[in-house]
């Protein structure tokens, strides 16, 4: 089982690392082309990315998880979840396309942009919103490929789309001098590359995921989203955190503090992506074992995944303490001493939270994989919405800017305590709970 788990985790880690690299490259090129204002504009748009990714992940990853559980249980309704995910993702994403066409300026102003940031960020946000169907559909394409015993192809799709993004970032922003619009176009086309690679599996003889010509089912959507809440909050948490932190930092110190957080947030995305990679790799193995009713093996692979995640967390914390200044200098093209000062202290305080976040992310993902939607949702909602919001407002009021950086580790600690309470309640409850049924 450990070998099988590693076979899923390894490609997911590489895929998430590739995603992180193109996000960092995007930030680096924008810092060169537009300086601190460009990073500020990008950071104000990040919550929009977070919402698109969260909805796409909840529908796509949740549907793929429900598909695995139903298929393992021998339920014929498993065949309907892929097409149902596609239809609902297209319907939801059309709303964002309309906003991108008619109201991008109003959205950016609501996110906190002043006149100068609005001028720089408006074309970027418009392109991002118009490409929202592809950002969201990509989750369905890769999740079902991964759960259909082709994790290596899902990894390859993510890696090659990331390489495409980096290459076209440079080409469109500098030789073609398209600036922020070029950066948005490169990012917008990258999920199309990923989905094209995934089609290799869907058109092959190895594919067991059918497309059924049925009307979109709300019942199946809710059943899928029920298991996709952890993925939803995992993606949305960074967007919500960014949104709250942006407003607090604008109030406390202005645009440069937001630019510093832009550096921290994008570096932190690497850590979150790697831990999510372990969680995603755990999901199909845990779902399969749960469907075959092997609880002892479930516990073994959960502990093994947790060990891997904690190892990654310790490595990340050591990295920012040893190489924090060189990392910051990569994104500080104007050599702003104030930006560097904010970012240096922020990296050290913020990244300590990953030591506890590793436990919370794996536990929430595991609960989702085995059909324990309530437990998974409580942990995910605590760390991604409730605790992080409360801690950000409380600690920023008490400590100022350092309190904003400390909100992340404090919220992860609060979530960990809540998860311990959940475990205690579960042990006191009935020793056997009814297994989840397919809708």
Image: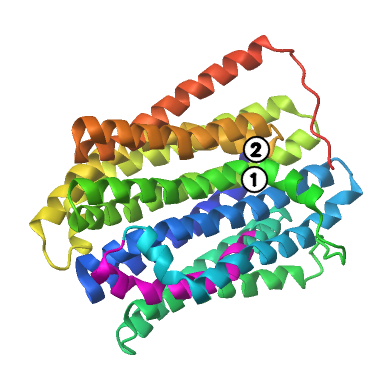
Residue 304, position as x, y percentages in the image:
55, 33
Residue 378, position as x, y percentages in the image:
57, 31
On the picture, is 338 further left or further right than 118? left
Nearer-the-camera pick, 85 or 110: 110
User: Which residue is most to the top?
Assistant: 428
User: Whole-Å distance between the Cαs marked 1 and 2?
Assistant: 7 Å
Q: Nearer the viewer, mark 1 or mark 2?
A: 1
The residue stretch that appears in magenta: 113-139
User: Which residue is most to the left?
Assistant: 337
Q: Which residue sits at x=23%, y=67%?
A: 37
What quarter of the picture does the C terminus occupy? top right
What type of secondary structure mainly makes up the magenta span?
helix
Using the image, tell me which numbered label, if any, was put on residue 368. Answer: 2
| Residue 119 among magenta residues | yes
User: Which residue is most to the bottom?
Assistant: 176
Mark 1 nearby-residue class (10 Å; few <14, some 14–19, many ≥20): many
Q: Is residue 416 above or below residue 228?
A: above
Q: Which residue sits at x=34%, y=90%?
A: 176
Using the image, tell me which numbered label, if any, was put on residue 297. Answer: none
| Residue 142 among magenta residues | no
Residue 436, position as x, y percentages in the image:
79, 33
Q: Which residue sits at x=38%, y=37%?
A: 354
Q: Is residue 5 visible?
A: no
Residue 20, position as x, y percentages in the image:
41, 58
Q: Are marks 1 and 2 in contact (CB under 8 Å)?
A: yes
Colouring of the image: rainbow
Nearer-the-camera pick, 230 or 217: 217
Task: State the SS at label 2.
Answer: helix
On the picture, is 223 further left or further right than 73? left
What quarter of the picture does the N terminus occupy? top right
């Amino acid at each position: 089982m450990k070998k099988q788990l590693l076979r899923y985790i390894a490609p997911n880690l590489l895929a998430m690392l590739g995603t992180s690299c193109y996000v960092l490259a995007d930030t680096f090129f924008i810092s060169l082309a537009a300086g601190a204002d460009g990073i500020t504009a990008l950071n104000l748009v990040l919550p929009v990315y977070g919402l698109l990714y969260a909805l796409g992940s909840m529908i796509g990853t949740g549907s793929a998880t429900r598909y695995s559980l139903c298929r393992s249980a021998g339920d014929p309704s498993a065949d309907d979840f892929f097409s149902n995910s596609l239809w609902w993702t297209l319907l939801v994403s059309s709303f964002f396309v309309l906003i991108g066409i008619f109201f991008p300026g109003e959205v950016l102003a609501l996110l906190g942009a002043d006149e100068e940031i609005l001028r720089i960020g408006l074309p970027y946000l418009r392109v991002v919103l118009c490409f929202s169907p592809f950002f969201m559909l990509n989750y369905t394409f890769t999740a079902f490929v991964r759960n259909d015993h082709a994790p290596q192809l899902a990894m390859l799709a993510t890696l090659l789309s990331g390489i495409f993004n980096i290459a076209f970032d440079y080409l469109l922003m500098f030789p073609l001098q398209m600036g922020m619009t070029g950066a948005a176009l490169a990012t917008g086309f990258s999920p199309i590359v990923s989905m094209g690679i995934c089609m290799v599996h869907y058109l092959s003889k190895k594919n067991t995921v059918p497309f059924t010509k049925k009307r979109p089912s709300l019942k199946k959507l809710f059943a899928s989203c029920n298991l996709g809440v952890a993925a939803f909050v995992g993606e949305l948490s960074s967007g919500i955190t960014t949104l709250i932190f942006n407003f607090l930092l604008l109030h406390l110190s202005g645009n440069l503090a937001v630019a510093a957080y832009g550096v921290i947030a994008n570096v932190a995305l690497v850590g979150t992506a790697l831990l999510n990679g372990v969680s995603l790799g755990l999901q199909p193995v845990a779902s399969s074992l749960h469907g075959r009713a092997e609880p002892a093996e479930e516990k073994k692979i959960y502990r093994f995944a947790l060990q891997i995640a904690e190892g990654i967390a310790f490595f990340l914390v050591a990295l920012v303490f040893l190489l924090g200044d060189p990392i910051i200098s990569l994104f500080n093209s104007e050599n702003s001493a104030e930006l560097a000062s904010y970012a240096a202290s922020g990296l050290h305080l913020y990244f300590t939270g990953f030591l506890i976040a590793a436990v919370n992310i794996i536990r929430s993902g595991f609960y989702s994989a085995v059909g324990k939607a309530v437990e998974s949702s409580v942990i995910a909602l605590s760390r991604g919405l409730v605790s992080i919001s409360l801690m950000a407002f409380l600690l920023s009021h008490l400590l100022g800017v350092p309190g904003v950086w400390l909100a992340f580790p404090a919220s992860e600690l609060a979530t960990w305590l809540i998860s311990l309470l959940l475990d205690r309640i579960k042990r006191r409850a009935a020793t056997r709970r009814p297994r989840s049924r397919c809708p």
